[in-house]
């Protein structure tokens, strides 16, 4: 079994909170400062997925969209260098894990 630590960045929107949420021991939620969408690494990753794997395609059905989305996400997962270049902001690299 792999023992990975998960740092999940959240944007702090009111609908992204839950009072009864139990955070696993090997996970931490890191809120972004208010009014900071450019700092959200997920925005850059989704932009990459939209541009490289979803843009200018005509999909026959929702299942085809899902397959293409999974293909893009797996490609990103296998390329740590690319993910770091898209989402490795200095403030993220300074967070002590």
Image: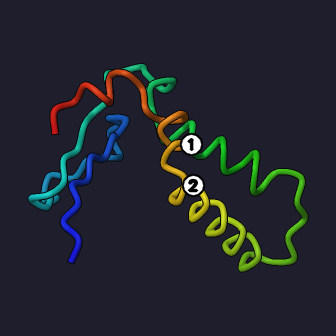
Looking at the image, which residue is at 72% across and 68% down?
Answer: 68
- For label 2, the SS is helix
Label placed on residue 92 = none
Asked if the residue at tag 2 contacts the one at tag 1, i.e. Cβ–Cβ closer than 8 Å, the answer is yes
| In the depicted structure, whether residue 35 falls above or below residue 74 | above
**Disc 1 residue crowd, few under 14, some 14–19, many 20+, Cα 10 Å:** some
Instruction: Report, in whole angstroms, how far the alpha carbon at label 1 lies from the one at label 2.
Output: 7 Å
Looking at the image, which residue is at 37% across and 21% down?
Answer: 90
When asked about the image quadrant of residue 48, the answer is top right
Residue 40 coordinates in the image, percent (x, y): 45, 32
Indicate which disc, 1 or 2, sits on the residue closer to the N terminus: 2
Label placed on residue 76 = 2
Looking at the image, which residue is at 58% across and 61% down?
Answer: 73
Q: How many marks?
A: 2
Residue 2 coordinates in the image, percent (x, y): 23, 71
When asked about the image quadrant of residue 93, the answer is top left
Residue 14 coordinates in the image, percent (x, y): 32, 39
Residue 15 coordinates in the image, percent (x, y): 35, 46
Q: Is residue 63 left or right of residue 60?
A: left
In the picture of the structure, the residue carrying the numbered disc 1 is 82
| In the depicted structure, whether residue 55 falls above or below residue 58 | above
Q: In this orientation, which residue lies closer to the viewer: 11 or 18?
A: 11
């Amino acid at each position: 079994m792999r023992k990975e630590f998960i740092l999940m960045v959240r944007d702090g929107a009111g609908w992204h909170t839950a009072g009864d949420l139990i955070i696993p021991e090997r996970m931490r939620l890191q809120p972004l400062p208010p009014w900071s969408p450019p700092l959200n690494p997920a925005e850059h990753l989704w932009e990459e997925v939209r541009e490289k794997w979803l843009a200018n395609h005509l999909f026959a059905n929702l299942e085809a969209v899902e397959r293409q989305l999974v293909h893009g996400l797996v490609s990103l997962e296998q390329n740590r260098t690319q993910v770091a270049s898209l989402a490795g902001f200095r403030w993220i690299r300074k967070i002590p894990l």
